[in-house]
Amino acid sequence: MSINSAMLAGAAGMRANSSALAAISDNIANVNTVGYKRLRSDFTSLLASQQGQTSYNAGGVLSTSSPLMSEQGSTQASSVPTNLAVSGNGFFVVRARSSDATSRDPYFYTRAGQFTPDANGYLKNSAGYFLEGWPVDSQGQVTANPTDLNALEPIRVSGIAGGAEATDLVSLSANLQSSQAVSPDAATYNALTNNMSSGAVTPDFETPIQIYDSEGGLHTLTVSFLKRDANSWYAEVHLPAGEVVPTAGLVDGQLASGIVNFTPFGQINAATSTLPTTITINENGTAGNPQWVSSLGLATQQITLDFGGPGAPGGLTNYDSPSVLGTSQVNGTPFGSLASVDVDNDGFVTAIFTNGLTRKIYQVPLATFGNEDGLLAEQGGVYRLGPGAGALSMRGAGVAGAGQIKSHALESSTVDLAEEFSNLIMTQRAYSASSKIITTADEMLDELIRLKR
């Protein structure tokens, strides 16, 4: 009868509003939870079939709560470089285990980016989930299949081997005095038998330059000049004789020899100069160029000599001013150990070493879905794939609709306390109103029962 259905509708209203109250309570409790997506309660009328009925029967109401996945929380600054926030679409891919994970351990998706290294150096958030990323090869490129979850690895930021960088560029800025008298040694100079690198000939000007080998060791590269003629100088580039094994046409630690010519305007004439601008020191046992001595065990190293050119600032010049070294610049670094890590806006995790070297070690992908509202919530602020989530795609930050990754930042909860307190009042009123339906229906039933008395 209609009175009974009214009583059941009141009970359904109380049940639906109590469910909504639970969702509001979760929202308020998680107002400070990083990456939290607030819940919204939707009420659906359960209309009973009225066909053939002479009186109305109440159907009641049903309440369902779901997170508002598309809402973006505000970004708050953090002093921790591995704290990450997503601005835009996408979720971090995480697992509950790190290196010991097996194929049975599922992948989850989260916006809670308060990642910090654990005791073993794996990035883990406060809920205990480990961040997954694509490994980066030695060329700084990601070669993993972006659609294959098995291509991901737990990101580890400790235990990274240090490194050194060999010198491959030497830039020299110096002036050779044009009025320098031609040395008597110039008449008998011979790069093979009577040269500057052996000490038999005293150069008119020379400059030592410190370079680094493939293991970060220091060597003194010397560039020597001897006046040959007007606007023309003999030149030799050499290392100490005990460090290299000579090749044909070079002796006494020479790496290169030749002539440097200048224009009447004091600038280097690259077209007529014969000194090589690229020198190669081979690994021991590799013929064709000077070789490192076997006791050093060094790799092949190619060095470009930048002596400038017409109109270019710096470089070698030939003006009537005392011979002097302006500047010499070399690249390369000695060995350095890991100092810190950082994450850029493309999601690359970069190791920074004490010698100034940087190396990309991982890229953090962002998982996107056809319908992110179809994700199913799990404990710890993570989500798993649901039947309505659509296709999973993993992309680099800023690629094909994926958002940006911000380091030193966290995404705040999307909860608005003012709205939640307003909903709390309305839910309480609705719950009380539903209870009045039950008491009213009870009084009407009591009247009906009294008719028998």
Image (spheres, rainbow, N blue to C red):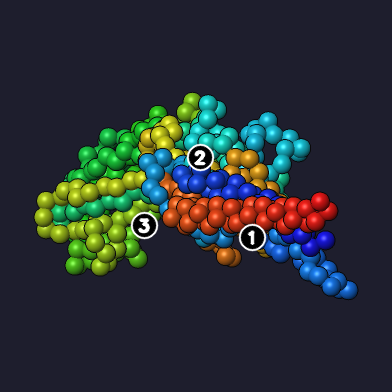
- Element type at mark 2: loop
x then y, percent, for residue 430 = 59, 57
- Residue drawn where x is 22% and y is 49% of the image: 327
Q: Around disc 2, counting alpha carbons within 10 Å, would you say few (fewer than 14), some (14 to 19), or many (20 or more)?
A: many
Residue 140 percent coordinates (x, y):
53, 49
Secondary structure category for the residue under label 3: loop
From mark 1 to mark 3, how far is it between C-alphas?
A: 83 Å
Residue at point 33% right, 60% down? 273
In the image, residue 65 sits, relative to residue 159, either above or below, namely below
Left/right placement of residue 324 relative to residue 417 reads: left
Residue reaching furthest front? 453
Q: Is residue 221 visible?
A: yes
The N terminus, quarter of image: bottom right
Which residue in the rendered view is the most extreme toward the right? 52
Q: CA distance from mark 2 to mark 1?
A: 34 Å
Between marks 3 and 2 in the image, the one whose residue lies nearer the viewer: 2
Q: Which residue is mark 2?
A: 115
Disc nearer the start of the sequence (1/3): 1
Asked whether 35 or 67 is in front, the reply is 67
User: For the residue marked with disc 1, what is the amino acid?
Assistant: Asp
Separation of residues labelled 3 and 2 (CA atoms): 58 Å
Choose top left, top right, bottom left or bottom right for residue 338.
top left
Q: What residue is drawn where x is 25% and y is 68%?
A: 311
Q: Are marks 1 and 3 in contact (CB under 8 Å)?
A: no
Q: Amino acid at mark 2?
A: Phe
Q: Is residue 11 left or right of residue 338?
A: right
Binning the other alpha carbons within 10 Å of mark 3 as few (below 14), some (14 to 19) or many (20 upward) gives: some
Residue type at mark 3? Thr
Q: Is residue 392 visible?
A: no
Circles 2 and 1: CB distance less than 8 Å? no
- Residue topped by disc 3: 274
